[in-house]
Image (cartoon, rainbow, N blue to C red):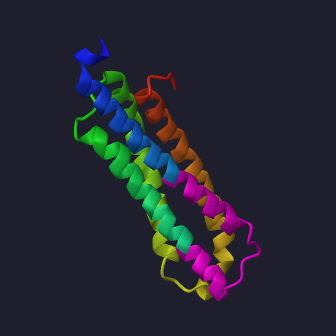
């Protein structure tokens, strides 16, 4: 039966690769977030600023990966299953909200000296962590639907 639909198997393989790339970027970002949080209390020093820049880069890479690996795949009408499209349509506005929060965090800390913002970093990281946790739930629901699992 699989030989009758070689394109379908190939599409699923490609979508699995995209999902694996997304999860890999997400895992790297979470690891850097944990490393950064472990540095508390924060001090405006060069090593801290370097760690924060590295985290911001990973955060943006993860956010872009989610867009290009998952949402663009859906937006380009490469997904045909209505159950997947339905859950994606339901969750996409929530994912956009998390993207906005991520971009605001990045804009605030990407190029700014910690001298001006170190006192806010712990709270901002905590809020960002909650945002990422929500985003992961939304992404996992879409991934589960794409994998044929109930969410």
Point out the image quarter for the N terminus.
top left
Q: Is residue 82 above or below residue 121?
A: above
Q: Does residue 36 appear left or right of residue 91 in this picture?
A: right
Q: Could you tell me which residue is drawn at 36 percent across and 34 percent down?
A: 13
Quadrant in the picture for residue 52? bottom right
Q: Does residue 100 appear left or right of residue 3 in this picture?
A: right
The residue closer to the viewer here, 100 or 72, is 72
Residue 9 in percent (x, y) is at 31, 26
Q: Does residue 41 appear left or right of residue 108 in this picture?
A: right
Q: Could you tell me which residue is drawn at 43 percent across and 42 percent down?
A: 19
Q: Does residue 10 appear left or right of residue 95 in this picture?
A: left
The residue closer to the viewer here, 82 or 21, is 21
- Residue at the front extreme, as displayed: 3
Q: Is residue 35 magenta?
A: yes
Residue 26 in percent (x, y) is at 52, 52
Quadrant in the picture for residue 32? bottom right
Residue 93 in percent (x, y) is at 39, 43
Q: How many marks?
A: 0
Quadrant in the picture for residue 118? bottom right
- Residue at the top extreme, as displayed: 1
Q: Is residue 44 magenta?
A: yes
Q: Is residue 27 above or below residue 5?
A: below
Q: Could you tell me which residue is drawn at 33 percent across and 51 percent down?
A: 68
Q: Could you tell me which residue is drawn at 49 percent across and 39 percent down?
A: 138
Residue 10 in percent (x, y) is at 29, 31
Q: Is residue 133 above or below residue 39?
A: above
Magenta span: helix, strand or loop, mainly? helix
Magenta span of residues: 25-53
Q: Is residue 31 above or below residue 120?
A: above
């Amino acid at each position: 039966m699989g030989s009758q639909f070689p394109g379908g198997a190939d599409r699923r393989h490609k979508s699995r690769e995209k999902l694996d790339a997304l999860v890999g970027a997400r895992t790297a970002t979470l690891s850097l977030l944990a490393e950064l949080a472990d540095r508390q209390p924060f001090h405006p020093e060069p090593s801290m600023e370097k760690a924060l820049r590295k985290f911001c880069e990973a955060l943006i890479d993860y956010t872009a990966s989610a867009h290009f690996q998952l949402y663009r795949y859906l937006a380009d009408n490469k997904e045909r299953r209505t159950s997947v499209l339905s859950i994606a349509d339901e969750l996409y506005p929530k994912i956009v909200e998390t993207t906005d929060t991520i971009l605001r965090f990045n804009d605030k800390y990407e190029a700014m000296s910690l001298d001006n913002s170190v006192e806010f970093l712990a709270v901002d990281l905590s809020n960002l962590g909650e945002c990422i946790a929500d985003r992961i739930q939304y992404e996992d629901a879409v991934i589960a639907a794409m994998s044929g699992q109930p969410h």
